[in-house]
Amino acid sequence: MMMKKGIYILSMLATLFIVTSCEDVIELDLKTQEPRIVIDAVLDGSDGTLTVRCSKTVDFYSNNVSDPISGAQIVLSDNTDKSFIIEEVEPGLYVLDGYDVTSTVTYTLKVIIDDEEYIASAIAPFPSIIQEVVILPVDIQGPPDEILFYSVNAGWFDVAGRENFYRVLMYKNDTLEGSSYSLYNDKENDGELMFYSTLTNGLEPGDEIAVELLSIDEEMYNYFEQVADMQSSGFSAAAPYNPKGNFNNDILGYFGICYSNKKEVVVQ
């Protein structure tokens, strides 16, 4: 069965409960935790851009979202022992442009911060391409007649003979719709035509809808699947946890590889 999970991007890994009554607002006394290193790294095979963000977590009540880490030493290598040094372009942001990514090749990212090494590896996936995007009106009973609903649908062919993983995003007039995306794998659909469909409203003639398909590696898929589980569990989870990435030394974040393509359609 094809797996699909809607994910809402999490901007924080800590949670604050606010309890309100007629007169009082009560904030729980959250203890300050030791800062933790966060490395978010994505290698886009479509244009050969590697983006690495290094930071430290901050206290929940801090005015800053994170504390950028400058001066890290970052090296990208493949299984032929070729390696490239990643330059820092602004505090905490490191970028390599024009790198030639090859499907099935294992790439390794090594980050050195304060003489500690953090290493992660990922296998480059095969790219898939959206064949068509179709927008159809949907008749839903209940809402007022003036609220019109549409289904946005896209299809692509899975690359046969290997496990493939996908992330799909939808944009309305160049803005990510709902700050959400969906995950798919091909465990029961190897080599077949795969579909994305979502329900939306508020569309008007002339609106530009774009669906972006990202063919992602398994490590990236597993990471965001954990984020999906956290979101769906909400406050009912037995105990809060941070999604586990593929870096060693128990740091936060992940190193992932993807190919992306986008197809646009104008609402008629």
Image (cartoon, rainbow, N blue to C red):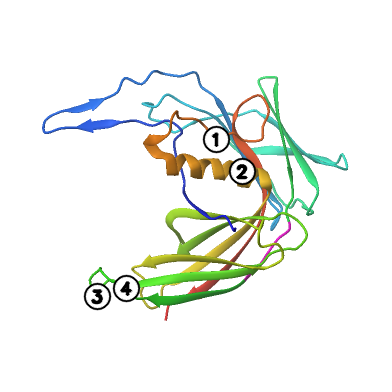
Kindly check if marks 3 and 1 are in contact, taking CB atoms under 8 A apart as contact. Answer: no
Q: CA distance from mark 1 to mark 2?
A: 9 Å
The residue shown at (47%, 39%) is: 230
Q: Residues within 10 Å of mark 3 (few under 14, many from 20)?
A: few
Q: Amino acid at mark 3?
A: Asp
Q: Quadrant of residue 256?
A: top right
Give residue 145's mark. 3
Residue type beneath disc 1? Pro
Q: Earlier in the sequence, mark 4 or mark 1?
A: 4
Q: For this view, does 63 lie left or right of residue 46?
A: left
Badge 1 is on which residue? 243
Compare marks 1 and 2 and give the one earlier in the sequence.
2
Identify the main secondary structure in magenta.
loop
Instruction: Give whichever of discs 3 and 1 has the lower sequence position.
Output: 3
User: What segment is highlighted magenta in the picture?
Assistant: 126-130
The residue shown at (38%, 32%) is: 15
Task: State the residue at coordinates (46%, 33%).
Answer: 13
Q: Which disc number belongs to residue 148?
A: 4
Residue 94 appears in the rendering: no
How far separated are the C-alphas under marks 3 and 1? 42 Å
* Mark 4 or 2, nearer chain start: 4
Residue that numbered label 2 is attached to:
222
SS category of the residue bearing label 2: helix
In this image, 223 relative to 32: left or right?
A: right
Question: What quarter of the picture does the N terminus occupy?
Answer: bottom right
Query: In which quadrant of the rendered image does the C terminus lie?
Result: bottom left
Please state the horizontal and vertical placement of residue 219, each as a whole percent of the image.
66, 43
Q: Is residue 261 visible?
A: yes
- In space, the residues marked 4 and 2 are separated at their CA atoms by 36 Å
Residue nearest the viewer, comparing 17 with 233: 233
Which amino acid, mark 4? Answer: Leu
